[in-house]
Image (spheres, helix red, strand yellow):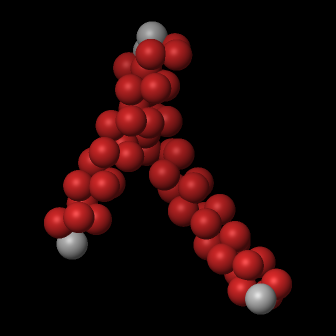
Amino acid sequence: MKKTMTFAVMHFSIAFSVAWLLTGDMIIGGLVALVEPAVNTVGYFFHEKVWARLS
């Protein structure tokens, strides 16, 4: 569980940093850091369904 939590913190930090550096806006950086992992999780779910069907 510790490894999962540290990875999540790293993921959020990177997403925030990249968005903030690109936009200069901390609010947009925060929104991207929250929304991107959620969207990525949904995408991963469907990716796995397609991959399982192809196997």
The picture places residue 11, in percent across and down from the top left corner, at: 38, 46
Image point (31%, 45%), residue name: 10
Image point (69%, 70%), residue name: 47
The picture places residue 15, in percent across and down from the top left corner, at: 44, 36
Image point (36%, 43%), residue name: 12
Q: Is residue 27 visible?
A: no
Query: Which residue is situated farthest in the left direction here?
Result: 2
Image point (61%, 66%), residue name: 44
Query: Which residue is situated farthest in the front direction here?
Result: 55
Could you say which is closer to the camera, residue 49 or residue 42?
49
Query: Which residue is situated farthest in the top direction here?
Result: 24
* Left/right of residue 27 with respect to residue 35 in the rendered view: left
User: Is residue 23 positioned above or below 42 on the image?
Assistant: above
* Left/right of residue 31 with respect to residue 54 in the rendered view: left
Q: Tell me which corner region of the image, top left, top right, bottom left or bottom right, holds residue 41.
A: bottom right
Q: Is residue 21 visible?
A: yes
User: Is residue 38 positioned above or below 12 on the image?
Assistant: below
User: Is residue 20 positioned above or below 53 on the image?
Assistant: above
The picture places residue 33, in percent across and down from the top left corner, at: 43, 39
Could you say which is closer to the camera, residue 24 or residue 2?
2
Q: Tell me which corner region of the image, top left, top right, bottom left or bottom right, holds residue 54.
A: bottom right
The picture places residue 46, in percent across and down from the top left corner, at: 69, 72
Which quadrant is home to the N terminus?
bottom left
Q: How many marks?
A: 0
Which quadrant is home to the C terminus?
bottom right
User: Is residue 51 positioned above or below 34 on the image?
Assistant: below
